Image: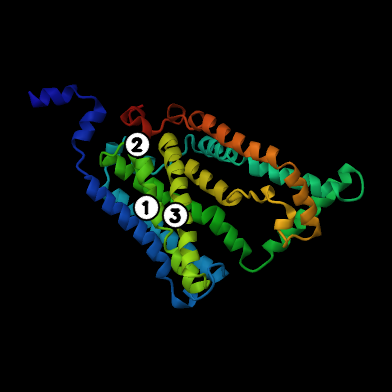
Amino acid sequence: HDAAWNRRLPRRAAAMAACGLSGLSASLCCVVMAATYVGSLYLLPRRLTKLHRDHPAHVRGRFVAVTVASAAAAALYAAVATPTCAGAPTVAAALGIVRDGSFAAAVSASVLTLAVYLGPLAVSALSFVVAADARPGNRSEQWRAELADDWDLRRTRLEQPGAVEVDLRNLLVGPLSEEVVFRACMLPLLLEAGWSRGRACVLSPLFFGVAHLHHLKRRVADEGVPVRDALLSTAFQFAYTTLFGVYTAFVYARTGKLSAAFACHAVCNFMGLPDLSFLAASDALPWLDRRERYVHAALHERSTFLLVLHVVGIVLFSVLLGRLTSPAYFASPLWLGGDAAVR
């Protein structure tokens, strides 16, 4: 009777019957992954850790550390997980490392993330136009001169020791390694253990947020920041990294593609937190030079319009969130379960 009943079960239900990973075991694995990732940064030789975190040698050492930690997390997932229990046909599929749809997922995630930055993008564009208009010559000459100066500033910065390594850390190695560990390895484990998609997307980023608490030590011991200020700064960082983690976990689960989560992370790191200083009058920002004060005054005059664009960006992001992360389009095994795995 039991055998006959099992034969009538859908394929996903039959596979799930053999899944024995508990929620506690999955959570412990996530703790080990997070601890290994953060701990790897402190296992570097003393000659590197005593250097500033942006020193090129220290940054390159961290590249090696997080690469090893990411590989260890993937190996741990492969050792303890049964991908079909999370709806994925293979370990690679569970980790979002697939060819089909990855480029489209990265583009969709980038567009979606940039939507929420509509306001900051407008501020940057307006700043460029105002600064260019202050130059002599016609519009074409003004824009060419402004672009040339902007390029010279960027090139000069990249020529500084460690600048290239810092950019690689912020835009490539950091986002990729963190998404491998905190999204690709953790989310399928928690889903396999029976967590709902909503619970996994909301709670798994806590591991990501907690992993950033070690910056408290850096702020106090290395940078000399007062403890109270360091606590406030670290608490704020915990809050926004956790919220950001919810977003990327949702995008990863919906698309099933590591490239999408990576794109979200890289774009956010590139754009940074929105700068709302245009709301303040120039007199409140005495450190601005003459040219910056001129540009800021123009931004402040249009502060209401710019603030509206910030709100519009958030609304646009909300409208596009479901459309640009369609599980059906991307055939996400983590969202569709066995339906995607058996196609």
Q: What is the three-letter code of the residue carrying label 3? A: Phe
Mark positioned earlier in the residue sequence (3 or 1): 1
Q: CA distance from mark 3 to mark 1?
A: 10 Å
Q: Which element type, helix, strand or loop, lies under badge 1? A: helix
Q: What count of labels does the image hold?
A: 3
Q: Which element type, helix, strand or loop, lies under badge 3? A: helix
**Camera-side residue: 163 or 339?**
163
Mark positioned earlier in the residue sequence (2 or 3): 2
Q: Is residue 127 left or right of residue 326?
A: right
Residue 13: image location, x then y, percent: 23, 29
Q: Residue at x 48, y 32 (%)?
A: 325
* Residue extending farthest left: 1
> Local crowd at mark 3 within 10 Å, few (<14), some, or many (≥20)?
many
- Residue 131, compared with residue 11, is above or below; it is below
Placement of the C terminus among the 4 image quadrants: top left
> Local crowd at mark 2 within 10 Å, few (<14), some, or many (≥20)?
some
Q: Which element type, helix, strand or loop, lies under badge 2? A: helix
| Front of the two marks 2 and 3 | 3
> Local crowd at mark 1 within 10 Å, few (<14), some, or many (≥20)?
some
Residue 114: image location, x then y, percent: 59, 40
**Camera-side residue: 21 or 67?**
21
Q: What is the three-letter code of the residue carrying label 1? A: Phe
Q: Which residue is mark 3?
A: 238
Colour approach in the figure: rainbow
Q: CA distance from mark 2 to mark 1?
A: 16 Å
Q: Residue at x 67, y 47 (%)?
A: 279
Q: What is the three-letter code of the residue carrying label 2? A: Arg
Q: Which residue is mark 1?
A: 207
Q: Residue at x 33, y 31 (%)?
A: 337
Q: Which residue is mark 2?
A: 197
Q: Which mark is residue 333?
A: none
Residue 196: image location, x then y, percent: 31, 36
